[in-house]
Image (tube, grey):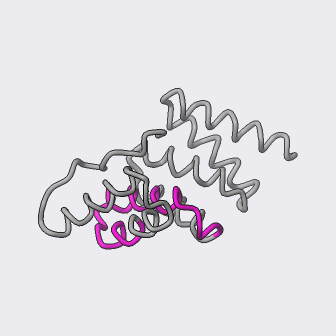
């Protein structure tokens, strides 16, 4: 497949995701990620699709790959935090959320993610799966 084919898979997958069809999005984005595993934009979209499907461990793996390739990407750390929190790993989620907040201290979504992680670690409750970022 060509770069044009991969781009078509990616743009179609994002469109499905934006239109509320994460299953179809994941199928296309998985193919795109297989063809170009180094593309973090594809991995981020795939993480969002997995999150929307409730596949939180898969979402965390996708966001982890983005973080590995782009460690200064605050949004990827936030996506990782949301996914880990939804998967039940509050300590790891807190670490990722703190990194996102440190990179973008004015972001209220990141601040809420840190607070939610802390609440869970202190024995409180949070909504299942948390609140996804506004753009999800």
Q: Which residues are magenta?
A: 69-96
- Whole-percent x, y for residue 16 in the image: 58, 31
The reply to whether the magenta stretch includes residue 64 is: no
Determine which quarter of the picture holds residue 78: bottom left
Residue 56, percent from left and from top = 40, 55
- Count how many numbered circles sit on residues in the image: 0
Q: Is residue 88 left or right of residue 5?
A: left
Farthest-out residue, front = 106
Q: Residue 66 sits in which quadrant?
A: bottom right
Q: Residue furthest top?
A: 19
**Would you say the magenta stretch is mainly helix, strand or loop?**
helix
Residue 35 picture location, percent across and down: 76, 54
Q: Residue placed at 49% from the left, 63% from the top? A: 77
- Residue occupying the far left of the picture: 123
Tell whether position 87 is magenta.
yes
Closer-to-camera residue (86/111):
111
Give the residue drawn at x 46%, y 40%.
Answer: 136
Please state if 3 lies on the left or on the right of 45 as rendered: right
**Residue 113, x across and y down, in percent:** 33, 57
Q: Is residue 81 above or below residue 28?
A: below
- Left or right: 114 as drawn, with respect to 104: left
Residue at horizontal 42%, vertical 45%? 133
Query: Looking at this view, is 94 or 28 the one in front?
Result: 94
Q: Is residue 135 above or below residue 90?
A: above
From the viewer's perspective, is residue 90 above or below residue 136? below
């Amino acid at each position: 497949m060509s770069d044009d084919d991969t781009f078509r898979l990616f743009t179609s997958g994002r469109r499905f995701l934006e239109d509320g069809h994460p299953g179809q999005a994941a199928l296309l984005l998985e193919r795109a990620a297989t063809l170009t595993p180094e593309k973090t934009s594809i991995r981020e979209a795939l993480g969002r699709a997995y999150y929307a499907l409730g596949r939180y461990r898969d979402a965390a793996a996708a966001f982890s790959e983005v973080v590995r390739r782009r460690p200064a990407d605050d949004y990827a750390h936030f996506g990782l935090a949301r996914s880990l929190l939804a998967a039940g790993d509050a300590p790891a989620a807190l670490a990722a959320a703190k990194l996102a907040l440190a990179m973008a201290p004015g972001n209220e979504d990141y601040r809420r993610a840190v607070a939610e992680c802390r609440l869970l670690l202190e024995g409180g409750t949070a909504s299942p799966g948390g609140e996804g970022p506004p753009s999800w």
